[in-house]
Each structure stands twice: as C-alpha cells, then as structure tokens.
Image (cartoon, rainbow, N blue to C red):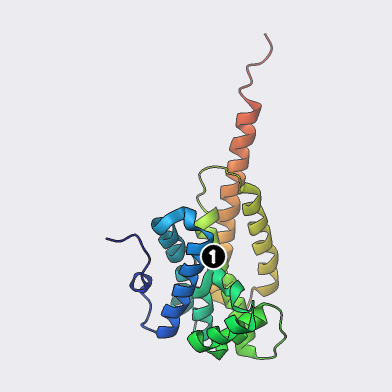
Amino acid sequence: MSDAFKYEDARLPQSDKFENATKLCKAWLDTHMAIFKDKGIKNFMLNQPVRAARLLVSETEHVSEASVIVALLGPAKQDILKTPVSETMAREMLGNAAVDLIQYMAGQPSNDPVMQRDAVRLFLVEGMSTMNDQLIDRKRIDKHHKVRWNILNNLESNFAKFQGRNPALDKMFAADLVKSRAALEALDRAAAAKKKGPNNGPR
C-alpha cells in the first residue's frame, strides 16, 4: 500500500471542494516538509487537518461546508490570501464562503454569525488535532519543546475567551488541555531529575 496520502484515506464525504483542499494542503507539505517524505506527510494529513475536519463533521450541528474546507487546508490556508491570483484561484477551487472565512480568521471584520461560529469551532478542532499529534503522550524532549509549551499556553489562554459556545467540543478540548499539560510537565520533571542526578548523601 502506498505511503502517499489520497483523499480516500480521509474517510470524508465525496466532495470536489474537500478533495481540492486536501490537495492544496499536501502540496504545501510537499514543499515545506519534504524531509518527512510520503509517510510522514500522510501521518500529518491524517492526524491534523483530516482529524480536525472529521471532528467538525462528527461533533458539531449544522456544520458548514466552508469550515470543513478550511480545516482540510491545514497550514496551506496561510497562502490563500498571499496574492490576488492565489485568492481568485482559491475562490474557484474552494468557493467564496471558504475564502471569506479565511479572511475573517486573518482579521477582516465580519458580523456574520455563522462565520464567527465557524472560526471558534476551527480553533477548537485544530487545537485538539495539534494537541493529540504534538503534545499528548509526548515521550521525549526535543528541540521543539519550548515551542510546544508556547502552543499549549496559547491554546489555554484562547480557550478562556471562546469556551461556552460549543459544549461538546469544549468538554473534549478541556480534557486534551489537561492531558497536554500533564505530558509536558512530566517531561520537565524527568529532565530536572536527570540533571540533578542521584542524591547519595554525605560521605
């Protein structure tokens, strides 16, 4: 079986827009994360953008097509608004609603309640996907340990602003925050104990 990601691996409804979003995400990963090769990129796709999209589909009511598309774009969403050409192409491939949602998440004001709701849901599902992929059950400290702490601190502070609007997702997110903090604190304790060394007492 090929290690390269295919849309069928996502186990999501058949949709040209959904599939286009995964293609854009994979192309971004092929460019920026080529070191991880097909297997690593496939794992990232399944553990982060696809997992976030599946959480939206399974755990929220009245899920919008645009929010699923934006979730599936993963890190590629940051390139959509880079140029007028990239934005126009994205509107043709993904639809106006998805690009409008990306613009709102990038800071463009909107009074659209659906867009505001979707942005909060995306924060929650993308945050959970990141925690499960990068923080929870972490077994060792690496050069990105401080970055992981920063990710957790940001998720905790932003959750305080957004909780209360999506009870089912909130409950899952809060549980993942606890697991993430426990994992990182355990790594810090182990590192401190190793640095301190055994205490043999005075001789």
Q: 83 above or below 35?
A: below
Q: Residue furthest left?
A: 1
**Residue 62 seen in the figure:** no
Please state the horizontal and vertical placement of residue 110, each as a whole percent of the image. Answer: 70, 88
Q: Classify mark 1: helix, strand or loop.
A: helix
Q: Residue furthest top?
A: 203
> Which amino acid is tagged 1?
Met
- From the image, tell me which residue sits under label 1: 128
Please state the horizontal and vertical placement of residue 196, each as a whole percent of the image. Answer: 66, 27
Total marks drawn? 1
Please state the horizontal and vertical placement of residue 175, each as a whole percent of the image. Answer: 55, 61
* Residue located at (56% from left, 90% from top): 96
**Residue 137 seen in the figure:** yes
* Residue located at (59% from left, 78% from top): 80
Q: Nearer the viewer, residue 25 or 168?
A: 25
The image quadrant of residue 82 is bottom right
Q: Residue furthest front?
A: 85
Q: Residues within 10 Å of mark 1 (few under 14, many from 20)?
A: many
Q: Nearer the viewer, residue 106 or 119?
A: 106
Quarter of the image containing the C terminus? Answer: top right
Q: Nearer the viewer, residue 62 or 89?
A: 89
The image quadrant of residue 32 is bottom right
Quarter of the image containing the N terminus? Answer: bottom left
* Residue located at (38% from left, 71% from top): 10
The image quadrant of residue 192 is top right
* Residue located at (43% from left, 77% from top): 58
Image side of residue 44 versus residue 102, left or right: left
Image side of residue 198 versus residue 111, left or right: left
Q: 152 above or below 67?
A: above
